[in-house]
Image (cartoon, coloured by chain):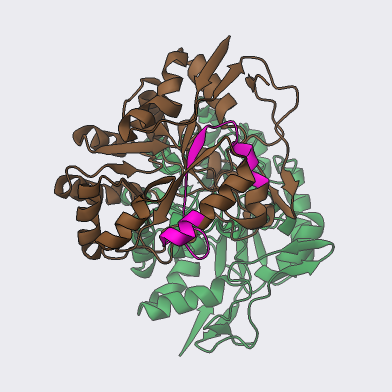
Chain colours: A green, B brown
Amino acid sequence: MEITLHSPLDMHLHLRDAEMMKLVAPLSSDFAGAVIMPNLVPPVTTPDMMEAYRQRVLEAVGCSFTPLMTLFFTPLGEKELEATRALPGFFGMKLYPAGITTNSEGGVSNLAEAETTLRLMEEMGIPLLVHGESHGFVMDREEEFLAVYRDLATRYPKLRISMEHITTAAALRLLDEFPNLCATVTLQHLLITLDDVAGGQLKPHLFCKPIAKRPQDRDALLAAALGGHPRLMFGSDSAPHPRCRKEACGCAAGVFTAPVALPVLAELFARHGAADKLQGFVSGNACKLYGIRPTERSVTLRDEPSAMPVPSSYRSYGCEVVPMFAGERLPWSIVR
Amino acid sequence: MEITLHSPLDMHLHLRDAEMMKLVAPLSSDFAGAVIMPNLVPPVTTPDMMEAYRQRVLEAVGCSFTPLMTLFFTPLGEKELEATRALPGFFGMKLYPAGITTNSEGGVSNLAEAETTLRLMEEMGIPLLVHGESHGFVMDREEEFLAVYRDLATRYPKLRISMEHITTAAALRLLDEFPNLCATVTLQHLLITLDDVAGGQLKPHLFCKPIAKRPQDRDALLAAALGGHPRLMFGSDSAPHPRCRKEACGCAAGVFTAPVALPVLAELFARHGAADKLQGFVSGNACKLYGIRPTERSVTLRDEPSAMPVPSSYRSYGCEVVPMFAGERLPWSIVR
C-alpha cells in the first residue's frame, strides 16, 4: 500500500537556533513547510528578529521548505502589527502564559493587557496560536485553561484561535462549540498516555508539555484525527533538547518526532482504515482554515519497513538529540 | 523545640540484599525496627529464606534494630504457615499483584487461589500486607484496587489487612469503613504530588510506585497523619536503587528516604502544630494494632538545621544511592 501526501505541513514545530537548528531543521525537510515557534532565548518578539530568524531557518532547512513564522506574543500596537504582517512568511502570534513551558518566561501573565492587540489581530485577520495551560495540577492544566479559550472565542468571534497541541477530550468538545477555534495535535498525543511516560519505568524522552493524559483522552484525539475533523491539524510540537538535558535529573520537556512523524502517521491512519483522512490532517485542513498555499511537494509513504531502524540519536554540530522510536524499525517508510 | 520519639518503627522498608544492603541498612538504624519487604531476586518465599535474610539484615544494620520479617505471599498450607509463624522476627505475609512493582513478577494473579491461605492466616492471626494497585491507568491503580481491599476486608473480618503505602483520599475513606483495615503511608506521599515528579522538569528521584497523586490526595493523607488517625502508620517504603538505574532512560521506581525520614517528619508535624501526634504515627499506632513491643530506644529531634546538608549521594561497597532532599539542609536534625 502507498499513500502520497501533497505538501504536508507541520503546524507546530520547534527548530531552535544555531547548532541545534542546523542539526534538526533538515530532518523536517519532507514537509513542505511548518509553523515555526518563537520561544528562543531571547524570544522572537519583533519583526526584525522574526525576519532574521526566518533567514536562518531557510538556510538551515533548505530552500524548498516554507517556514510559517510566528511572533512571540507581547502587546503590540497597530503600527507594529502592520509591520509584522507585511513581512514575508509571517503566519501568526504565539501566546504563552508566562513561565508555562520551555523559554516562556516572558509570556503573558494577564490577558487583560492583551485586549487591544487581540482586537487589532481580529480586525487584521492575524491568527492567534495559544499554549493553553494553567499553572494548576499537571493533569488539569489544559482543562483549566479551556475557560480562557472559551472567553477568547466569545469575545473575538472573528479571531482565528488555534488551541496548540491539545491533549484532552475536553478540548475537543470545546473545539466543536466554537467555529473560530481550531487545534493542532502532536504525534505522541495520538499514541501515548501518562502510562507510557510514568506507568512502568520513567521515560524522559516521552515527557512533554502538556503531559500525555488518560487513555480516554488519547482515544478521543485519535478518533477525531482519523475521523477527519476539519479543524484539527497535525502539529508535531517536535521539540529537540540535547540528550544530556533529557536524560538528566531535571529532564526538559519535549518529544523529538520530526524525523519519524510522516511514516508513523501513515501507518497509524492506514491501520485504522483512515488513509484517506491523512491528507486533510497533515495539510488540507490547515490550507482551508488559514488560506495557505504551500509549495507543491509530494511525499510517498509505503507499508514497507524502513531499511534501517530509527537512529538511536542524531548527532552533529556538537549536538545530540534522541528521536521518538529511537532504535526501532518503523513498519512504514518514505519512498525516496 | 525538641521531640523525643520512643522506639520509632518504619512499617515498610526495602533493605535489598548484599552490597546494597550493607550500604543502606545502617541508614535505618535510628529506627528501633522496621517491617522488611521480601521482594528480593528471587523473592523471600520460604521460612528458610526468610530466616537467612533476617540474619543478613541483622548483620548489616547492627544488633539494636528489630527486623520484622515478611514472607512474599504465595499460597501456603497450614504446616508451612505454622513453620513460618514459629520463626523469630516473623511479622506477616506481603501480597503483590503479579508484575505490579519492582521484583513482583512471582506475585498473585488470581486472588481465588489465595483463599485457603488467607483463611488460615485469619485463624492464626497472621497479618496480610498488600501492595494495592491494579494494572490500570497509573493515576487510577490504587483506587481501582480498593474493591479488592473491600472484598478482603469483608470476607476475612478477623484478618489484619494493611493497605501499604496508600496515596489517595479514597483509600483513607475505605480505611474508615473497615476496622480490620490499617494502612501505611510514606514520607514522600505526605509531601509531594505528581506536580513534583512531572509538573516542571521530570524528577526521577521522586518517581515511585504508587506514583504521587493529586494535591487533594496528599492533603488528605497529611491531615490524617497529623490528626493522629489510629490506624495509619509510618512506612517509608524507602526503596534504594543504584543511581545509574534512577537516572537512566528507563528510571526504576522508588524514593530513598530512610536517612532523612525522622528529621523531615519532625519538622512537618511540628510546623503543623501536631508534634504530639508523631509518636503514634511512627510507633504507637503500629504497636497497638499489631501488639508489637519493640526494643526500647529513643531518638531526640531538634528544630536546628543539621550541621551538614543531606549528602548528594551515599556511596560504598560499589553502590551509590541518592536520597530524597539530596544536597539540602534540613531544618530539623537528630540530636546525637
User: Is residue A275 something that shows in the picture?
Assistant: no
Tell me where residue B121 appears, x and y as whole percent: 25, 51
Count all numbered tags in the image, as a single digit: 0
Residue at image location 75% in from the left, 51% down from the top: A51
- Whether residue A329 sits left or right of residue B282 in the image: it is right
* A60 to A183, vertically: above or below: below
* B105 to B39, vertically: above or below: below
- Whether residue B3 sits left or right of residue B320 in the image: it is left
Quadrant containing the C terminus of chain A in the rendered view: bottom right
Residue at image location 63% in from the left, 33% down from the top: A76
Where does the magenta region start and end? B23-51
- Whether residue B211 sits left or right of residue B220 in the image: it is right
Is residue A228 covered in magenta? no
Quadrant of the image occupied by residue A46 = top right
Is residue B32 covered in magenta? yes
Tell me where residue A209 appears, x and y as whole percent: 54, 48
